[in-house]
C-alpha cells in the first residue's frame, strides 16, 4: 500500500458505468468505490479531480498491432495491394530495421495509442532480422518509460520461400532459436497477477509463414509457461487456399490440429469462419481481435462479429499494424468497427455501446485480463477521459454516443494503474516534435535501403 491519497474522479459529464453518477474513487492502482448520484464518497480524505468536463471510459485495450510498422506507413510500393503481395513488398523493407529504428517505431505507436485513450496494448512483433534479437526487450523498455500496460508477443516466422512459405530467408529464424528466445523473454519480463504491467505471449505469425512443427512446439511451450497464444487466422481467401494446398484443410482445422483451439488463444481477424467453426471457437473460448480499418484497407473482408458473439466468442478491437491502418488511434478504430459492423448488420443490431464494449470488456477477454476493461470496484484504475470541447462535438446530445458518432480521437487524460500517463492531451516528458523528426528520418532511411 502506498501513502498516496485516494483520488475522487468527481462528477463526470458521463461515465461508462452504472451507479457512478458522482464518479469513482481510485487508490493503489484499483477502483475502490463507485459514487452514486447524490452521494459523496465513503472513502475518507480523498484528493479531488474535477471531471465535470470529461466523458470517462474504462481504458481502451488494443488487441492487435505491429508497432514497427509505423516506419512504413502509406508506402507507395505496398499501396493498393492485397495481403500477400502487400507483405511481399514490405518484408525486404522491414528486414532493414535496426534496434534504433525499432525503438522509434515502438515509441510512436505506443504514444499514439496512449493519446487516443488506450491503456493496455498488445504487440505482435514477428520480424527478427540479424541484429534485432532483442526486439521484445526494446519494446518492454519503451512501455515502462511511457507507463502503458502491455501484453507483448514474442512473434516468429520460420517458413520461408525456400520451404513454400511467403517471407524471404532474411526475416525468418530457425525453430530452436525461436523457442529458446521465447522462453528467455517470458522468464525475463512476464509478470503475473492482476496488477501486472508487462506480460508476454507467444505468437507465430500465420499459417503461411510458420511450420506445423513450430506451431505445435509453441503451443506446448505456452502451456508449460502458462502464457497466452496469438496468431493471424482466417484473414483472407488466399490464406484459405494456402491451407488447403499446404495442409489439406481449412485454417481452423489446422489450428486445432496444432493444439491451439483453446481459451489460451486469441486470433487476429477471424473473417472467414463458417457457422460450424464459430461454434467451435465459442466452445473452446478462443477469442477474436476485430481489425476494422486494416480489413477495409487491404479489402480482406468483414469479420462477422454478431454471429461470433451469438456463438459465444468474445470480440476485441485491434488497430493492426500501421502499415495496414495506417494509424494507431484506438478511438478511431472503435468508430471504424462501429460503422463497418453497422453497415453489415443494420442500425438495430449494432450501437456505439457495442463498439465500446468490444474495445473494453471484449478486448480484456482477448488479453486474458478480466480485471481490465470495466469501471467497477476492484478493477484496475485504467481510465480514458475525453473532453467534448472541440468543434466536432459542438451541439451534441448524448455525450457517450458523441465520442463514437462525432469522431473523438484524442483523450484529454489517461490513467494507467492509478497514474496519469496523459495530462492535458500530452504525455508528460515526451518531446513530440523531436520524436517525429527522428522517427521520420529513420523511416526514410529504412525505406530507401
Ligand atoms: Zn496483423
Image (cartoon, rainbow, N blue to C red):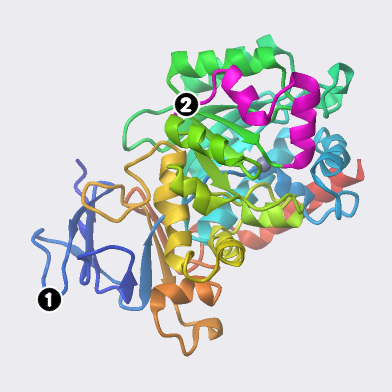
Q: In this view, does 64 lie above or below 47?
A: above
The structure residue drawn at horizontal position 56% and vertical position 41%, both measured from the top left corner, is 275
Q: Which of marks 2 and 1 is nearer the N terminus?
A: 1
Outermost residue, front direction?
Answer: 276
The N terminus - image quarter: top left
The structure residue drawn at horizontal position 38% and vertical position 62%, both measured from the top left corner, is 57
Q: Where is residue 278 in the image (x, y as percent from the top left)?
A: 53, 39
Q: Based on the picture, tell me whether residue 251 belongs to the magenta stretch.
A: yes
The structure residue drawn at horizontal position 52% and vertical position 28%, both measured from the top left corner, is 201
Residue tagged by mark 2? 262
Mark 2: secondary structure: loop
Label 2 crowd (10 A; few <14 / some 14-19 / many >=20): some
- Give the quadrant of residue 44: bottom left
Mark 1: secondary structure: loop
Magenta span of residues = 236-264
- Name the foreground residue: 218 vs 436: 218
Q: In this view, does 205 lie above or below 419?
A: above
Q: Is the magenta stretch mostly helix, strand or loop?
A: helix
Residue tagged by mark 1? 38
Amino acid at each position: 500500500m502506498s501513502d498516496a491519497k485516494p483520488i475522487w474522479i468527481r462528477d463526470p459529464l458521463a461515465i461508462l458505468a452504472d451507479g457512478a453518477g458522482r464518479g469513482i474513487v481510485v487508490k493503489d492502482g484499483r477502483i475502490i468505490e463507485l459514487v452514486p448520484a447524490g452521494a459523496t464518497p465513503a472513502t475518507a480524505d480523498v484528493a479531488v479531480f474535477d471531471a465535470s468536463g470529461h466523458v470517462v471510459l474504462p481504458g481502451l485495450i488494443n488487441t492487435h498491432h505491429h508497432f514497427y510498422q509505423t516506419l512504413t506507413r502509406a508506402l507507395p510500393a505496398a499501396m493498393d495491394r492485397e495481403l500477400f503481395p502487400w507483405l511481399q513488398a514490405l518484408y525486404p523493407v522491414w528486414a532493414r530495421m535496426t534496434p534504433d529504428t525499432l525503438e522509434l517505431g515502438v515509441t510512436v505507436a505506443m504514444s499514439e495509442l496512449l493519446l487516443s485513450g488506450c491503456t493496455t496494448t498488445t504487440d505482435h512483433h514477428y520480424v527478427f532480422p540479424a541484429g534485432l534479437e532483442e526486439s521484445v526487450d526494446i519494446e518492454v523498455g519503451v512501455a515502462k518509460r511511457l507507463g502503458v500496460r502491455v501484453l507483448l508477443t514474442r512473434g516468429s516466422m520460420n517458413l520461408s520461400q525456400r520451404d513454400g512459405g511467403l517471407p524471404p530467408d532474411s526475416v525468418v529464424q530457425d525453430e530452436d532459436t525461436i523457442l529458446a528466445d521465447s522462453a528467455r523473454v517470458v522468464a525475463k519480463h512476464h509478470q503475473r497477477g492482476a496488477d501486472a504491467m508487462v506480460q508476454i505471449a507467444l505468437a507465430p505469425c500465420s499459417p503461411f509463414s510458420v511450420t506445423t512443427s513450430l506451431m505445435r512446439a509453441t503451443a506446448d511451450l505456452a502451456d508449460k509457461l502458462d502464457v497466452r497464444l496469438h496468431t493471424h487466422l482466417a484473414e483472407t481467401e488466399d490464406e484459405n487456399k494456402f491451407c488447403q494446398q499446404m495442409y489439406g484443410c481449412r485454417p481452423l482445422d489446422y489450428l486445432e490440429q496444432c493444439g491451439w483451439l483453446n481459451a489460451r488463444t486469441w486470433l487476429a481477424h477471424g473473417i472467414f469462419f463458417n457457422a460450424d467453426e464459430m461454434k467451435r471457437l465459442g466452445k473452446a473460448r478462443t477469442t477474436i481481435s476485430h481489425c476494422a480499418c486494416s480489413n477495409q484497407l487491404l479489402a480482406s473482408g468483414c469479420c462477422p462479429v454478431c454471429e461470433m458473439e451469438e456463438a459465444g466468442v468474445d470480440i476485441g478491437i485491434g488497430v493492426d499494424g500501421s502499415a495496414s491502418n495506417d494509424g494507431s488511434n484506438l478511438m478511431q478504430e472503435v468508430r471504424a468497427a462501429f460503422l463497418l459492423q453497422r453497415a453489415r448488420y443494420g442500425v438495430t443490431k449494432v450501437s456505439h455501446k457495442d463498439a465500446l464494449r468490444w474495445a473494453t470488456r471484449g478486448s480484456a477477454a482477448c488479453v486474458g485480463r478480466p480485471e481490465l476493461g470495466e469501471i467497477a470496484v476492484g478493477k484496475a484504475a485504467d481510465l480514458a477521459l475525453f473532453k467534448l470541447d472541440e468543434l466536432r462535438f459542438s451541439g451534441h446530445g448524448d455525450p457517450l454516443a458523441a465520442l463514437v458518432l462525432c469522431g473523438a480521437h484524442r483523450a484529454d487524460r489517461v490513467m494507467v494503474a492509478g497514474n496519469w500517463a496523459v495530462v492535458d492531451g500530452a504525455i508528460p516528458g515526451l518531446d513530440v516534435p523531436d520524436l517525429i523528426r527522428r522517427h521520420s528520418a529513420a523511416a526514410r532511411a529504412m525505406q530507401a535501403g
